[in-house]
Amino acid sequence: MKAGTVVLLAAGLTLKVVAVAPARTNSASPAQVLSQLHLQPPGRTPVARASSALEQLRPRLLGADRVSELRPTRLVRVSGQTVVQFEQWLDGHPVLGAGAAVVEDAGGTITMITSTLRQMEPGSRQTRLATLERARQLASRAFVSGGGRSRGPARAGTAWMMFGTGPALVRLVTVPGLEPLGDFTYLVVDDPPRILWVFRRGPNALGYAYPQNPAVGTYEQVELPYLTSVEHLVGDNVTVYNCAGSDQCGTKQQLATPDQDGNYLIEPTGANDPVNIDDSFVEVQAYYGINFIHDFFAGVGFSPSPIEVQVNYPMQQPNAMYDGQGHILMGQSGSIDLAVENDVIYHEYGHHVFGEVSSAGMFEMDQYGPVTHGLAINEATADYYSCSALDDPELGEYFAQQLPAYFPDGYLRNVHNDLTCPWGLYGEAHDDGQIWSGFLWDARALLGQPVADNLYMKVLAAFPGTVTFPAVTQVYLDTAAANLDGDTVNQLRALAEQRGITDCERFIELRRQPHKGFVFGKEILGQYGSNLAFIPAELHYFMEIPENAYHLSLTFTSRPPEADLVILVREDQRIEHSFSWTQGLQSTYDFMISGSQDLDLPSDDPLFRPGHTYYLEVANQGQATGEYTLAGFVLVESSDGGGSDGGGGDAGADAGADAGADAGADAGADAGADQAGDGQPVCDDGYGPAWDGSKWVCVPICKEGYEPQLDGDTWVCVPRDSGCGCAATRPAAGASLLLLLLGLMLLRRQRG
């Protein structure tokens, strides 16, 4: 029968034979692949349906063979389909290399069958064979005579093997070797026995693990490669320990042990359910996960050093950590065990790789206070490579599933985002890193995964010691220019500019729209916190109050109450901080406010004066870490004496954006002249004509630095977007102590 032949079966089933070879009685029977199937055999389970399909197709797959038995051995769920694997048995013994795999889609329809089944004909079987004990003795002597040292008694079994003259029974004797390490399987035939061949199986084992995490799929049978121990999960790339709830993992154990075949087929149920503080399933999960991500990075071009993983590490809150010294701590908090989530394992391993590849620092303190953009880039790198390895932009679905009130979107972070700098900054490294990981994911979509992942590994190695968003962006683009064509580099540069990372710093112009930020509490400094008046936030803000402003509005919210948040304010200069050994933290600002402000200008006791720019920074006088929102705008007098909105940079941002681009007496007078020709309106004093894209309108004539924009139905003067133009500098020498103290908590944040 030729490939492509359509076969009509008695059961009314139709299949297309894609590749067919005649059944042959030798040791290398070609596989049959029956694809484009649409079979819906009876059965309540995938195994029952697969067994029914094989029985219906038996004449095609096994010909006249009515003596062989097909036994299901494994069920694998992957990528929305279920695969049931079978072995062929005869007279109670397996047929070596003979089996079938039945593929079923999510709807229960069988779509493909692959088969290496062998037709076993009565009367053609050879059965002369030595006893199991004689075969075991022969193989053991052969192993020892070759200089081997075993780690246990040899195991013997019987199987059918296909020879040129037909099938024959053979003895398979496996000697577990210690030196050299591995399983040595001897093929023993005839009586008196003789060794036909020996196979060495490296110290790999099988186990159960989640390919990603419990939120997106079930656990499967996986391979556990690179083992160097026959007793525990110790290998070339990782050693796994179980803390079993001991404080700070003071007692490290290895509870997962192999079965008689050397496998770790431990299911996450009963005593080994990960909700338990001493289950052994997560040891297998961690071993599998680390080796997978190690091989991923090896494919990217870097082979990380070995690492130690501690599972069931007791923590008050769900978290995981990399300690910077080659240890990953997978936390258990109550019934939440993050060791089942490869997203998190890969993320922590990403910190390990970052530390080995890059010399970039993670945090420091410049003249404007603490800055953690280096840590944000580190977090972004760990997020990006974790998501790229899994080809899934959402990280931490299982984590989020356990805490839906905190993560209503169903994930911890998402590298497929539209965050930009500086408005997308939050002041905390994990969140701020999403701007950089978002750019990396954009680049991956443009370049493809292999190119993007390899390119970024080169970029990491070239990072400077002090990391800022503009600095790493420049390194990325320069590295891309050395490896890619000019057009592609230009596209990458455009992506970076869209993200705002080519010139981004942490100074944000206030708008009507509230901006959310984060500030640590004194608790991060422990006993040293009481020595400081406050902890300054990382983010700074500014707003300009024009000469003709008559009202100022600042809206400030904060939580929780234990975080005693205030706003530092300085006129015309940025707020600065320094640290000295004798005087501690020294901050330069003009005054402090503790809540929202709604002021008519000028006031009798003016804190804010028209004609000046004010810089603001949130500070935390309390113990608890806090979160806040801050918004601000001013109202200004228009030139005809009427009021208009002179603040809130996003008010009507899209309406008339180009109108009045040349602020002054003729603001917008020529706008759209080529499109509209004559018909410009005669406007009142203080207003000039402008083309809004469809018609002429009268807009206010704004002072220098302001432009007209539409706010609802009213044109107002608002400040032009001044962008982000501050340059971070190296910290003064005296800042090192506060940096060290901040680093204690920041490093802890970095591990999660």
Image (cartoon, rainbow, N blue to C red):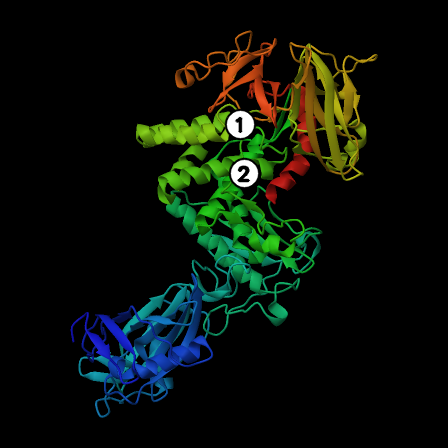
Q: Pointer 1: what residue?
A: 654
At label 2, the amino acid type is Gln
* Residue 659 shows in the view: yes
Q: Earlier in the sequence, mark 2 or mark 1?
A: 2
Whether residue 665 sits left or right of residue 443 in the image: it is right
Whether residue 95 sits left or right of residue 640 in the image: it is left
Q: Nearer the viewer, mark 2 or mark 1?
A: 1
Of all residues, the one furthest to the right in this rendering is 604
Q: Tell me, for residue 669, which label it has, or none.
A: none
Whether residue 534 sits left or right of residue 361 in the image: it is right
Helix, strand or loop under label 1: loop
Q: Tell me, for residue 434, which label it has, or none.
A: 2
At label 1, the amino acid type is Asp
Q: Position of residue 39 (x, y in %)?
A: 34, 75
Residue at 31% x, 77% y is 96
Q: Position of residue 66 (x, y in %)?
A: 28, 89
Q: Position of residue 75 (x, y in %)?
A: 44, 72
Of all residues, the one furthest to the bottom in this rendering is 123
C-alpha span from label 2 to label 1 = 26 Å
Vertical arrangement, residue 670 with respect to residue 447, above or below: above
Helix, strand or loop under label 2: helix
Of all residues, the one furthest to the top in this rendering is 665
Whether residue 174 sits left or right of residue 123 in the image: it is right
Q: Quadrant of the image for the N terminus?
A: bottom left
How packed is label 2: few (under 14 Cα within 10 Å), some, or many (20 or more)?
many
Vertical arrangement, residue 728 with respect to residue 206, above or below: above
Residue 442 position by quadrant: top left
Q: Position of residue 116 (x, y in %)?
A: 28, 74
